[in-house]
Image (cartoon, grey):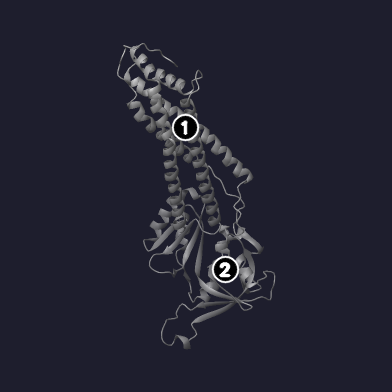
Amino acid sequence: MRLSFLIAFRYIFSKKRKTFINFLSYFSVASLSVGTAAMIIVLSVFNGLESTLKSIYEDFDPDLKIKNVNQKYFDNDLREEILSVEGVESVSGVLENKALLRHDEKEVVCFIKGVDNNFAEQERIVNNITDGSFSFKQNNLEHAVVGRGIKYSLGLNSSSDFQNIQVYALKGSAKLNPNILRNNVYSQKSIKTAGVFAIENGFDNGFVFTSLEFAQELFDKNNKLSSYEIKLYNKHSTSKTKAQIAKKIGPDFDVLTFAEQREGLFKILKTEKVVVYIVFSLILILSSMNIYFLLTMMTVEKRKDMLVLLSLGIKNNQIKKIFVFQGMIIGCLGVSLGVIIGLILSTIQENFGIIKINLTSSILEAYPIKTNPWDLIIVASIVILVSVFASLFPSITSTPVKDFSTSNKLVL
């Protein structure tokens, strides 16, 4: 095996003669390097985007969320049971529903999210306040924390004590019937602005936080919740804690992890990443055709050498291994150079942000990059396997018929 490897290495990097086959060897290495580097960079960009989206949604979504399976609202009587589960740091009751906000003839439809006093302990929205404070009671008056987009849409000033927001919501007991137009089906309340938060446009334009009591009164849902939001001591034990909570509160409730709350988004990201693997694997397979043609040509050029090797007692299998080793050497060189190039370019982009997104609505200036070691391993494995398979057919057809009638000279 060692002899086969040395001969394969010498065939690729022979210094005696520079032929088209030598050029094809270098070109095969270069094409695999470019394909490997491109695959690593694109996968790193997807990892960076996924990591960025996770960090954004983690500022808004809880570690665990509990919702009733059968109905939208349920009684607020599970908090102590959930808190008794090991690993649970904080539990907040939430009532969430749509409402209409009006201020100075300007209107916005958004979600009112009423939260209890324990919500601030979870340090999510609290850490994203850009103006004012996260508080719901000031001078015995109801206040709200609004998204930055809603602030601009309604022309609000969080430091003003004279601005009132009119909040309209469909009464929970209202029914659609012929007399609906003659009935008052909306409840109306006034609220002031205590603070402004900014996370991402979807949240900033769509959510207003109020006290739980205000939301329950507005939506006519006394002592009702739409969900519990939970903060854990250790996010790495999410699955274990989820199972314990689900066992304790019974089958009438769903316990959703962070990924399950945004299941559609993460499915899209995973699907796109799989597509990247498939597309670049096809590109690498096409690049490996260079190896196939290289080794096919080499089996013709080195035919006399192989006859001499056979006459010296070298076995057919050892000759076949020469060409397999050539494919492996080219693949390993391509992987090594590609990984180095990919890591260098990824590091430059990560530290200096050379490639810009150039979108005014984007929250990022440059494309995010995050290299995953598992991606490197998978990419390297794909390239090496493709190279080995590309060399199998030439190696099978490489052994010539043994013929010593002609004088042969070994040329390495």
* Residue 195 in the image, given as x and y percentages of width and height: 64, 66
User: What residue lies at 54% left-to-right and 34% top-to-bottom?
Assistant: 340
Res 157 → quadrant: bottom right
Res 145 → quadrant: bottom right
User: What residue lies at 69% left-to-right and 72% top-to-bottom?
Assistant: 160
User: What residue lies at 32% left-to-right and 17% top-to-bottom?
Assistant: 315
Q: Residues within 10 Å of mark 2 (few under 14, many from 20)?
A: many
In this rendering, does residue 358 appear at all? Answer: yes
**Total label count?**
2
Q: Secondary structure at mark 1?
A: helix
Q: Is residue 170 left or right of residue 120?
A: left
Look at the picture and state if 161 lies above or below 381: below
Alpha carbon separation for disc pair 1 and 2: 58 Å
Look at the picture and state if 14 lies above or below 162: above
Res 104 → quadrant: bottom right
* Residue 399 in the image, given as x and y percentages of width and height: 33, 21
Residue situated in front as seen by the camera: 251 or 395: 395
* Callout 2 amino acid: Val
Residue situated in front as seen by the camera: 344 or 215: 344
Residue at the disc numbered 2: 208
Q: Residues within 10 Å of mark 1 (few under 14, many from 20)?
A: many
Residue situated in front as seen by the camera: 338 or 238: 338
Residue at the disc numbered 1: 28
* Residue 226 in the image, given as x and y percentages of width and height: 46, 67
User: What residue lies at 51% left-to-right and 35% top-to-bottom?
Assistant: 338
Which residue is at the far front? 406
Q: Secondary structure at mark 2?
A: strand
Quarter of the picture holding the C terminus: top left
Between disc 1 and disc 2, the foreground one is: 1
Look at the picture and state if 136 lies above or below 270: below
